[in-house]
Amino acid sequence: MNQLGKKVVAFRIPILILSVLLLIPAVWGYLHTRINYDILSYLPGDIETMQGQDILLEEFGTGAFSLCVVSGMQNREISTLEGELKEVAHVKDVIWYGSIADLSVPMDLLPGDIKETLQNAETGSSLLIVTFDTSMSADETLDAISEIRGLTDRNCLLSGMSAVVLDIKKICNSEALVYVALAALLSALVLALTVDNMLSLFSSCYAFLAAACFVPFVGGALWKGGTTKGAVSSSVVGMLTVVAIWCGLKVPMAGVFPILPAAVTYVAVSLFTKEERPAAA
């Protein structure tokens, strides 16, 4: 260990340069890694929610909708807005008073319940229902919501689950760097106050990451029989093994030993849960 420490000190400049160079692909990967905000894509294909979503898309061609509340606009202006909304990619249809009756027909002739649904007499606001040909949280739907908001910035409010998902996405993206910086600062503070041997720390971190990530990553890439439950179980067993070693468990090659029980768990659990995997579309 002393010899390793001396070599690290002797080659500290090349190691520092290499570390900085490795940050370049790390930053590139962070900026170009897509985050999947489509909640439905994480659900099994055999549950009623997914089946209903598939029926909506396949039989009705509509997977999502949003409600647009328009205030302070005349019917002619709303009609113009309707045409602009229909030109947005993946917008299937826009439903409002002007789509079920000619604007020359007074709204008072409509049944009372329909009139109250489409227009609020007290505020003078009108309701437009915008339907999409993609699923609720699909990237195409969220892009369409963003474009629609650019068109409806004049006395218009857009609601619905797709709009909520887009707002959550924007909030998460805007605050992610703050939380990452705060976590890094607190981690550095704790390490500075509690750790006196950096080599031991690096060895422990390597063992923890290898136990939690190495087996599920390699197994998922090389073996088609791996399952989600197998990957999760493997990570849990690997991390528990590392904790046991930290608590005093004596094992050979403690830095890489947790990979062994993690790998055994991954294979065993995947074999037992293989029949539960949803069929590929």
Image: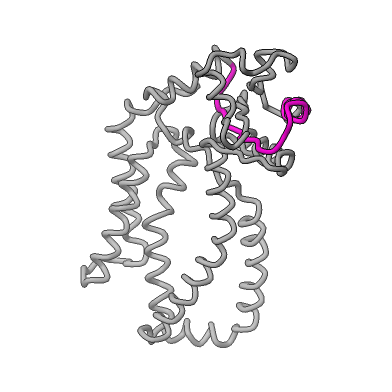
Going 56% across and 38% down the picture, which residue do you hit? 159
In the picture, the quarter occupied by the N terminus is bottom left
**Picture coordinates of residue 220, whole percent (x, y):** 45, 41
Q: Is residue 126 above or below residue 31?
A: above
Instruction: Residue 80: give x, y in percent of width and height.
Output: 78, 28
The x, y position of residue 4, in whole percent, is 47, 81
With respect to residue 83, does 14 lie above or below? below
Residue 79 falls inside the magenta stretch? yes
**Left or right: 77 as drawn, with respect to 21:** right
Count of marks placed on residues? 0
Whether residue 66 is visible here, answered yes or no, is no
206 versus 123 height, above or below? below
Q: Looking at the image, what colour scheme do you see?
A: one colour
Q: Which residues are magenta?
A: 61-86
Q: Is residue 170 left or right of residue 268?
A: right
269 or 132: which is nearer to us?
132
Residue at the location (67% across, 58% down)?
Answer: 28
Instruction: Using the rendered image of the protein, determine whether residue 108 is visible from the camera's viewpoint.
Output: yes
Between 233 and 9, the one lying in front of the other is: 233
Q: Is residue 213 above or below residue 149?
A: below
Residue 266 within the segment the image draws in magenta: no
Which quarter of the picture shows residue 106? top right
What is the x, y in percent for residue 233? Answer: 30, 46
Q: Nearer the viewer, residue 162 or 109?
A: 109
Residue depicted at x 62% and y 28%: 128
Residue at left 43%, top 43%? 219
* 269 or 151: nearer the viewer: 151
